């Protein structure tokens, strides 16, 4: 029974641990699933923002090219005027230049370049002498290329920290073979600033690069290095000889705002779902654990009750020895074992002498005390393997496994020497309490019924009591307190 109880207790513990493991696994799975969903939505949102930003940047690049070509339209118009009226005087040309600067945004100056010489300004740009010198040297270096006098060209010049110029050259074909071209200097930074302010529906971090040189950078461009979450989309554009790179980072477009709002909502819902799932899982686990604890307590109580009932059913309440029912069951098993393996087996039937006189003169309380003391004396003499039981009233019975008759006789002699003096307050003469012993044994080869061996022991006990002397025993009795 104890091994079964241990197995049941271990089974309950294993089930409780398994419940907690299942709850922890379900919680981890839910968390991983929600984190995976958030990561997937974030990746999809990043892809959508990337596509949206690339589309906006491509559209902005096309519009920028059209804007710059429209600025070249002023030079084209003047070139056509000069082709039709080549005899215009210098004041007339200056008037045309002033009119062109006045009516063309971001055009700072316009003039004429001839034979790799410096420009002759019809309407000079409002620059300092140092800036004009840098511009003239840059034009002289650039016009050394033969292709400049054949096709329109565009290049940039950094005149100063405040002025970055977009220089456009429009060749004029003369029959005389003279190399000359119209030159226009545009203020690039205001041109790009006005263009991006008008071309982009929402402010976006954008910059224009020529190689590694930054020509323009919007105020929204981050001053710190970009984080791992941010990204930059680039798009190359080419206008004649000018090769630029447009760079843009995502702005607060509708797509970005929608994805950001949706992601925040998804994160909030995921947290609520995770908390709710974990709460439900752990509540169910706690409920199961509480029920298991209640079942365990109830099982422990039933186990204690079962042990108590088993003890009451198999032991004698007064002496603590085995009772008659337990002894008879055990006696049958011992007899079967002795018959099967041909082993010796002895039985001692014991009766307390003068017990009736003790009850009559001193009362049943003294009699109960005598029985308890007799049980103690018998235990002290017997082995642990011997089976001692109270057979009824003042009778005791002992099963001696693996004990031949000669050894059983020696045990009986020890028991017959047990003598208990009953002390009385009234100095009444009560004979000392002794015991009588009857012996019987199992003989190999004889198939006797277990009850027959008990009857033989009882007859031997009856014979022993008939020869009991009426006088007090002269042996030194042990006192009963």
Image (cartoon, rainbow, N blue to C red):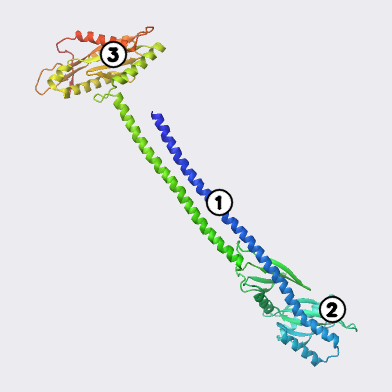
In the image, residue 263 above or below residue 29 = below
C-alpha span from label 1 to label 2: 67 Å
Q: Residue at 56%, 60% (x, y): give it.
A: 263
Asked where in the image residue 421 lies, by quadrant, the reply is: top left
Q: Residues within 10 Å of mark 3 (few under 14, many from 20)?
A: many
Per the image, the residue denoted by label 3 is 348
Q: Residue furthest top?
A: 445
Per the image, the residue denoted by label 2 is 149
Per the image, the residue denoted by label 1 is 33
- Does residue 338 appear left or right of residue 216 in this picture? left
In the image, residue 465 above or below residue 117 = above
Q: Residue furthest right?
A: 176
Q: Position of residue 451 (x, y in %)?
A: 31, 12
Lower sequence index among marks 3 and 1? 1
* Image quarter of the C terminus: top left
- Does residue 313 appear left or right of residue 244 in this picture? left
């Amino acid at each position: 029974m104890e091994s079964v109880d241990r197995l049941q207790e271990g089974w309950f513990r294993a089930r409780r641990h398994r419940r907690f493991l299942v709850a922890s696994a379900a919680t981890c799975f839910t968390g991983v699933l929600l984190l995976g969903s958030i990561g997937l939505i974030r990746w999809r949102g990043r892809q959508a923002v990337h596509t949206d930003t690339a589309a906006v940047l491509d559209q902005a690049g096309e519009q920028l090219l059209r804007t710059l070509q429209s600025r070249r339209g002023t030079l084209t118009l003047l070139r056509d005027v000069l082709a039709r009226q080549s005899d215009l005087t210098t004041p007339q040309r200056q008037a045309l230049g002033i009119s062109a600067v006045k009516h063309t945004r971001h055009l700072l100056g316009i003039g004429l370049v001839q034979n790799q010489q410096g420009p002759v300004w019809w309407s000079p740009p409002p620059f300092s002498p140092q800036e004009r010198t840098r511009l003239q040297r840059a034009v002289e270096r650039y016009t050394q290329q033969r292709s400049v006098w054949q096709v329109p060209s565009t290049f940039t010049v950094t005149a100063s920290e405040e002025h970055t110029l977009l220089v456009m050259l429009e060749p004029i074909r003369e029959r005389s073979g003279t190399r000359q071209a119209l030159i226009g200097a545009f203020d690039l930074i205001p041109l790009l600033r006005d263009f991006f302010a008008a071309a982009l529906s929402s402010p976006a971090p954008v910059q224009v690069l020529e190689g590694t040189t930054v020509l323009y950078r919007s105020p929204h461009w981050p001053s710190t290095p970009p984080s791992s979450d941010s990204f930059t989309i680039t798009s190359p554009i080419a206008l004649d000889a000018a090769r630029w790179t447009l760079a843009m980072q995502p702005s607060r477009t509708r797509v970005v705002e929608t994805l950001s709002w949706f992601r925040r909502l998804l994160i909030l819902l995921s947290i609520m779902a995770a908390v709710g799932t974990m709460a439900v899982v752990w509540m169910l686990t706690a409920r199961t654990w509480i029920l298991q604890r209640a079942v365990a307590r109830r099982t422990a109580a039933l186990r204690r009750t079962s042990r108590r009932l088993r003890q009451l059913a198999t032991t004698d309440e007064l002496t603590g020895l085995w009772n008659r029912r337990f002894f008879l069951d055990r006696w049958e098993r011992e007899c079967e074992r002795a018959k099967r393996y041909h082993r010796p087996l002895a039985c001692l039937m014991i009766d307390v002498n003068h017990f009736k006189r003790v009850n009559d003169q001193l009362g049943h309380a003294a009699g109960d005390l005598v029985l308890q003391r007799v049980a103690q004396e018998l235990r002290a003499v017997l082995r642990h393997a011997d089976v001692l039981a109270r057979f009824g009233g003042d009778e005791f019975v002992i099963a001696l496994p693996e004990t031949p008759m000669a050894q059983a006789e020696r045990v009986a002699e020890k028991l017959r020497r047990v003598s208990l003096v009953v002390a009385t307050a009234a100095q009444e003469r009560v004979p000392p309490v002794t015991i009588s012993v009857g012996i019987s044994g199992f003989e190999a080869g004889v198939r006797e019924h277990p009850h027959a061996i008990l009857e033989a022991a009882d007859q031997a006990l009856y014979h022993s009591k008939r020869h009991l002397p009426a006088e007090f025993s002269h042996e030194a009795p042990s006192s009963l307190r």
